[in-house]
Image (spheres, coloured by chain):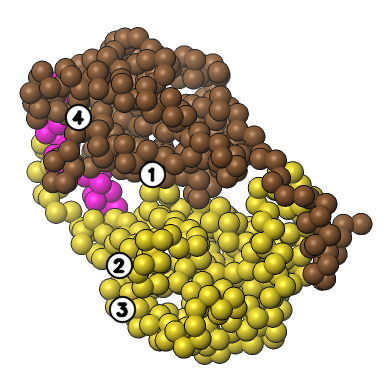
Chain colours: A brown, B yellow
Amino acid sequence: MTAITDALRTTGSVRLDDIDPRSTPGFDGDKEAGTAALEGGAKRLGELQERLFAASRAGDERAVLLMVQGMDTAGKGGIMRHVVGQVDPQGVRIKAFKAPTEEERAHDFLWRIERELPEPGLIGVFDRSHYEDVLIHRVRSLTPADEIERRYGQIVEFEQRVAERGIRLVKVMLHISFEEQGARLLERLERPDKHWKYNPGDVDERAHWAAYMEAYEIAIERTATEAAPWHVVPADRKWFARLAVHELLVEALEAIDPQWPAADFDVAAERERLLATGGVRPAP
Amino acid sequence: MTAITDALRTTGSVRLDDIDPRSTPGFDGDKEAGTAALEGGAKRLGELQERLFAASRAGDERAVLLMVQGMDTAGKGGIMRHVVGQVDPQGVRIKAFKAPTEEERAHDFLWRIERELPEPGLIGVFDRSHYEDVLIHRVRSLTPADEIERRYGQIVEFEQRVAERGIRLVKVMLHISFEEQGARLLERLERPDKHWKYNPGDVDERAHWAAYMEAYEIAIERTATEAAPWHVVPADRKWFARLAVHELLVEALEAIDPQWPAADFDVAAERERLLATGGVRPAP
């Protein structure tokens, strides 16, 4: 457990108003120091990921699942690019959940989630998740209130089962301020190379900001458990949010502590067999 | 077209014996210069990939498909890590083709390939491909000779269709020497953290080296077309192979030349709507 991850974890309730989106809990360096810490940690993260992958080849069934939630412009894409992008892409599966398809709507809300759980040895990453079904669905009344009530319990049970299967859950809410979202949306409007990221619907959702914050607080309180804690990551400073999620991934992998598998063949005999093929210069 | 990609491309026949796996065609720098060129090109590759992705959001259906073939230890994994890993993982789909499953064997050999073609805006990457069905299948007589004969033609037709759909094909053979493979297999045996990558079957395949080289030459000759040329990449020097594949990806994206989509909304009106939500500091 690092100072940052310790400071961000919650298994109880939070008041988002009390968490400054510009703060950097557990880290007293500046942007330069934070960026250097992120870059400096890439090697460690990469080695842990490779060990996780290797261990799965010998039957280790464990995996990691990073779930990233946040308001539009909170920096989910940047987390994918700058944190998830630090590790070997062969060991990562990113899934972005959009509005459900007709087929998905015909099933329970967790059906499409379960199908995307990471296989052993992989780092799964969810860009949005089943939490949309208790966030926008609550704010926009897309689902009856009593059904949303039931969903919190279903989520807790589901995540408990997932954790018991050996998938380590890392739940992140990127916490930006109303003002910072305004500035980021404005930037998307002012730069032609950002227009494709702008969606007029984002402004409509913005009118419901307070209701979203309340929905997040309720979702966190109802679903933050020992098996699947939440991490509220202050995200007005992109460099801090990226460093924090990096640390969370490192911590999850260190908790698994995957080991290089032992050889399931006779190393000395294979060496002889290899040398017998010719053209091999044995090390001096 | 860069000097490297130009030097590596073939739409005709090749003699692998005449291509030195330690050579660096089209590049006269050393390892340090090559590594710097690879790192220096990351930004350009990243920007092109983002433009490809953005363009697809406005209906551009084009995509890139990198297919990587090579003998065991040729460096396919390193290409994934160090070249494909240069771009935003959200824009990449890597598919490693293993021995076909029972379901896959019940279909035509191209069935499982077609299902993994990249969607618009993505860079698809195949770690092995349908070429296994004319390489190991030929060397190990897993398929009757007349059927393998037919497959070359089927591959050419298939790739032609894929190219016509707007998927730009980049076919790469990582060309290592018999001696270099021996050294790399030996290293896997001598380092406990590499044992998991070692497979005794690799030594058995090594006994068929000459037959594999012949199978590659035939496959290349029969399937190198204008729509889907082959690139034989000397790969004894890992740094060169990575730089070369990087250049091939840049070239493919530059040929597509994807454009930032125009706004499909009224920018000025959206700006007013956004400012009306409050909390937005307009730029000075």
Mark 1 and mark 4: Cα distance apart in space = 19 Å
Instruction: Tell me which secondary structure the magenta stretch mostly adopts.
Output: helix
In this rendering, position of residue A114 left or right of residue B140 = left
Give residue A133's mark. 4
Mark 3 crowdedness (10 Å alpha carbons): few <14, some 14-19, many ≥20: few
- Disc 3 residue type? Arg
Residue B12: x percent and y percent?
Answer: 52, 90
Crowd around label 1: few <14 · some 14–19 · many ≥20 (10 Å):
many
- Callouts 4 and 2 close, C-beta under 8 Å: no
Of residues B55 and B159, the one nearer the viewer is B159
Please tell me if label 2 and label 3 are on a single chain. Answer: yes
Q: Is residue B51 visible?
A: no
How many other residues sit within 10 Å of disc 2, few (<14), some (14-19) or many (≥20)? many
Q: Which of the two marks, 2 or 1, is nearer to us in this view?
A: 1
Report which quarter residue B5 is drawn in: bottom right
Tell which subunit mark 1 falls on: A
Which residue carries the number 3 mark? Answer: B161
Q: Which region is colored magenta?
A: A188-213
Q: Amino acid at mark 1?
A: Ile
How far apart are labels 3 and 1 at the CA level?
29 Å
